[in-house]
Every structure is written in structure tokens, then in C-alpha cells.
Image (cartoon, grey):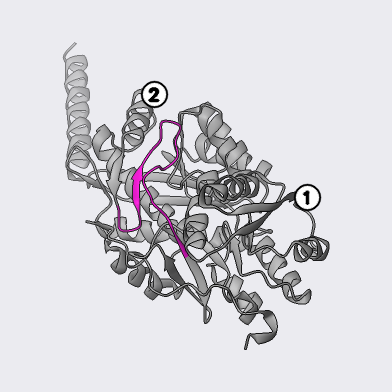
Amino acid sequence: MKKTQTAIVGIVIIVILVVAGVAVYYMTMPPAPVEKKYFKIGCAISLTGMLAANGKSLQQGYEFWLTNVNKRGGILCADGNRYPVQIIYYDDKSDAATTAKLVEKLITEDKVDVIFGPFSSGCVGPSSAVTEKYKVVMIEAAGNADTLFARGFKYLFTTLKVANELGEAYMRELAKQGAKTVAVIAPDEPFYVSAAEGFKNYAPKYGIQVVHYERFPFEIKDYAPIVTKLKALNPDIVAMGSHTVPAMLLMKAAKEADFNPKAYVFSFGTMIPSFVKELGKSAEYAMEYTAISESATFKDDYFGTAKDFYKAYYNLYQTYPDSTISAAVSAGVAIEVAVKNSGVVPPISSEDAKVKFRDALAKVDIMTAGQPVKFHEKGWNIANPLGLVQIQKGVPVCVGPADWATAKMVYPCPPWKERP
């Protein structure tokens, strides 16, 4: 009996020593690292394919904001903390079906909080149906065809004006120059057609007669027959719904045909470096709308004035910011404001957090160094008055309205044979 008691006492002592040893071990261990919270933004974007030049430019806009916000420590939330931002990119190869698949992957596998939109209305269309399904906000800077915002989606926002409103700036400024007639053309894709409809609708309001309106297959690469038709009409203005590649194709064909309207205007694509690099002096005098000018009175606490914005962007990328860039950067700023106002912190994963963030974004009404932002109830930006830029000596300069202008518009542009 005595031996049994002694054995029990021994076992108890051993157990006590083991427990004490384990406790000391865990007490002396370094604390487990706490996972740092951050906001994750996903983006499927055209880094290869036909839209690659525009896609890479858009990516630079997103990155410009990302660098700025992370230099400040991240997005300031209502809890008083700042949370850094990560953007996950995938190449959609300029293919809309691929964009949709990648956006779903970003939501379901990468668990992103927000989607930055792709380039082009064609790619925004199917991918925004995915974000709507999962109730994840897509805020985008390169898809503004009217049809995108006629679907009643609640989670799609763009910091651009809707495409059919872009034409107002062109016709307003060209009417001041004495333009009387316009021919409007567009490849048959959502954004191009929406922009072309805007040219057609705004022209009569400023006393400009539409002498021709034509849509043609997007796949066409030979613009010579189109130019031949336009040359016979001799319009003051040729207005084209476009991105960079269609704009270049038209300018090349016009030069070859010695077609000399008084103005060539495009809905998008002339301000990125590849336009001038590819066309050289043939790019001269082409015009495009702009949402920003270094002379605009825009200002914010993140980038400073519009002039500061211009300078900082040029110093980093050796190119000037276009409307897509100002829209991309202001999209990031809008996210910051909506995050703070909604009270969410990362991750934005619960149903309640998603709704709060979406509702706060819908109420954003801000001025940024790139442009003002206020959303229409259907999701597009209604705040910016817009102006025009023109390529002069290889550089895009703002030529209207007067309070934005940094140079005088060249109108009529010189005939091809008189150009240097």
C-alpha cells in the first residue's frame, strides 16, 4: 500500500513538472505574429491584345493612386487606423469573356474587397454582371457606354461621364471656331457607338449639321473606302467614336487619300504615347475630350492642385495624364472617402459591410486634383464639365474651354501637303 502511494505521488510530481515546463515554454515563446489587415483590390485588364496600349495606360493611373495612398500609410478608416492597399492584376488579353472569368476568380479565390474596372465598355459589360452577382463594387475608369448603365446595376460605378454626353464639349468648342458640318463614324462596339451618338445628337444643338452617320464592323482594318466616302462629302469635322487603334487607322487612311477636313476629333485614344509614336507628324491636330487640364481649378488633400497632379504624373511616367488617368486616380480617392464614411475596415466581406460601402460610394460628392466626382443614381459621374485637347508639336495641349486652355486651337488644321 505504501509503495502504491509513493508511486502515485511520483506520478503527480512528474505531471506537475511537465505542466509547469509547458507553461514556461509558452510563456517564453515570442508572440504569434498578428496578420496585418489591408485592402485588396482586384483588376483584370488588357496588358496584351488589341487594347494593350490603353490597358497599360489605365494600369498606370491605378498605380499612381496606389503609390500615393500607401505613402500615406494606406486608407484611413473610421476606427482611426490606416490600412495599406494591394492591387492584384490579371491580363484579360483584351477579351471580354476572359475578363469576366478573371473577375470571378478575383472575387471567389483572391477574396478582393473591390474591383477596379478593365479597359473598354466591351470588357466592363460581362465582368460587371459578375460583380453584381457577388455584390462586390466595381468602380471603373474606362467603360462608359450608355448600355452599361441601362441595366439597373447597383454595384457598378464609373468616374467618367457617360459616353453620349462627351460630344457636348466637342461641338461647343468647334462651333465657336465656325464649324458648320460634321460626318460621324464609329466601329460597331458599345463605347464607340455611344460616343458617336453623342456627336450626332449634340451637333444640331450648336448649329452644326450632320451630313453623314455610319457604323461599320469593328474588325475592319482598311479604312480607305470609308475615307473615300467622307472626302466626297467634304465635312468641316470628322468625328469618330474610337480608341487608339481605330483612331490611328483613320488618320493613316486620311493622309493616304489626302483628305483634309478642318478638324479630326476622336472620343478617345490620341493622348497616349503610342498614338504620336506610331503616327509621328501625322498625329498633329487630332483632338480628344479631356476631363482635366493643368489650368483647371481642381484641388484635393492627396495630390494638391490639377497642376501638381499633371507635374507629378509626368515626372513619373514621362507622359501627360488623359481622362482615363484622371478617372482612375479619382476612382481610388472615391474609394478612400467611401471607406471612411461607411465605417468599414478590411476585409469588406460580410453582406452588411458590402452594402454599407456601396451605399457610401453612391453618395460620394468630392473634388479631386484630377476631376470632381458625383455619381448619377445609375452610376456614372455627372460632375465634370469637360474640355478638349489637341496634339500640337507632338504634345497634347488643352484648347478649350477658355478657362482651361493652355494653347489656342489650330482650326482649320493645315492640309496634309502643307504640313512639315
Q: Which residues are magenta?
A: 368-388
Residue 274 relative to residue 375: left or right: right
Q: Amino acid at mark 2?
A: Glu
Q: Main secondary structure of the magenta part?
A: loop
Residue type at the position of mark 1: Pro
Name the outermost residue toward the right. 225
Q: Is residue 38 visible?
A: no
Look at the picture and state if 246 lies above or below 186.
Answer: below
Residue 227 shown left or right of residue 362 in the figure: right
Q: In the drawing, what numbered circle is on residue 41? A: none
Q: In this rendering, is residue 326 above or below 116?
A: below
Asked if one can make out residue 390 in the rendered structure from this viewpoint, the answer is: yes
Magenta-colored stretch includes residue 185: no
Per the image, the residue denoted by label 2 is 351
From the top left corner, tell me how far across and down residue 192 is, in percent. Answer: 64, 50
Q: Secondary structure at mark 1?
A: loop
Among the 4 quarters of the image, the one containing residue 125: top right
Q: Along the polypeptide, which appears first: circle 1 or circle 2?
A: 1
Question: Which quadrant would the N terminus be assigned to in this image?
Answer: top left
- Which corner quadrant holds the C terminus? bottom right
Q: Could you say which is closer to the camera, residue 117 or residue 36?
A: 117
Q: Residue 312 appears in which quarter of the rendering? A: bottom left
In the rendered structure, the answer to whether residue 77 lies left or right of residue 279 reads left
Residue name at image x 61 percent, y 45 percent? 197
Residue sitting at the far bottom: 420
- Measuring 63% from the left and 85% from the top, which residue is drawn there? 419
- Tell me if mark 2 has few (under 14), some (14-19) or many (20+) residues whose alpha carbon lies within 10 angstroms of its own: few
Location of mark 1 (residue): 217
**Residue 73: where, in percent of width, then height?**
25, 55
